[in-house]
Image: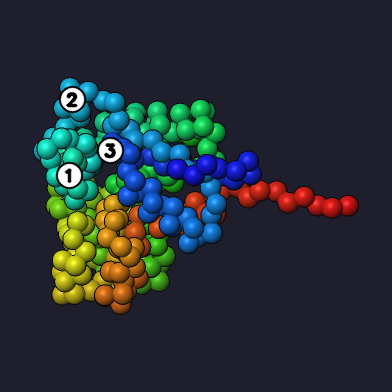
Amino acid sequence: MSAGQPNQPKIGFVSLGQGPRLDLDSYHQRLLKQTGIKAHVIWRHVLDGLSHEALASMAAKDGMPAIRSNLRQSGEHSALGPGWTARWFDRDSFIPLVQEAIDDLEVKDGVDLTIICAAEEFPASSFRSNRPVVLPSIAMAAYAQLLANTKPTATLGLLVYGDRQRQQQKDGWAAKTWAGDLSLVFCGHGNNLDAAAEEFRSNIPDLILVWAYGAGVGQGKDGAESLSLKLGVPVISAAVASISMAAKLLPRASEKVSS
């Protein structure tokens, strides 16, 4: 977390897991620097402090919209390394937790903007805020809409984690009236970018959206960039889309005008 300067804007990042996530923080700091943003970053991890019983009550039910979250758990090992595990939770159970984080960041920390670090789509009007809140699904969809506007029969690739969320992802795109005749190609190798590149080679899309927020984090070069270089097509990650949008929504420090 940066120390912050009086005139620097404040960005709140909300993760839908536990923290701290040093890998995500360094990743965002790198993206902010590339975008030319100097900001004070403040994190909220919405599953921090919840009891085992509370977490159990949020478990995803078969066929219901779900979100994959990272938790600290002794003796486990996941893509984040030792001491971490990943579990599926009911998507809508996050709504009050995320809303509480938004309120806390705006009221307690005075952030200028909040980014929700999850690519999944929430129902319309799930959240309320006094400052801009960037939802990665909306930021990424803007690129797909631009493509569909002039090439309605384009093929859109979606890089996700497995197939657990496939129906909710299909339903989400079916609800976008502008999507027209876009063809969707799903790839479940969000945790393995090399495998994702090989799978996409058999049917290279016009555009790939990394619909898995942490895909490629901690693997050196930005995952979206490496995938784009391998396949020769534009690849937009959730974090890159969100920070690009945030760059236009953040206030700029006022300049003093000499008389």
The residue under label 3 is which amino acid type?
A: Gly
- When the figure is inspected, residue 194 is found, relative to residue 142, above or below; the finding is below
| 2 or 1: mark nearer the eye | 1
| Residue extending farthest right | 259
Q: Which mark is residue 17?
A: 3
The residue under label 2 is which amino acid type?
A: His
Dot 2: few (<14), some (14–19), or many (≥20) neighbours within 10 Å? few
- When the figure is inspected, residue 184 is found, relative to residue 137, above or below; the finding is below
| 1 or 3: mark nearer the eye | 1
Name the element at disc 2: helix
Across and down, in percent, residue 178 comes to 37, 59
Q: Are marks 3 and 2 in contact (CB under 8 Å)?
A: no
Across and down, in percent, residue 154 comes to 30, 71
Across and down, in percent, residue 95 comes to 33, 32
Dot 3: few (<14), some (14–19), or many (≥20) neighbours within 10 Å? many
- According to the image, label 2 marks what residue? 52
Name the foreground residue: 233 vs 142. Answer: 233
Q: Which mark is residue 82?
A: 1
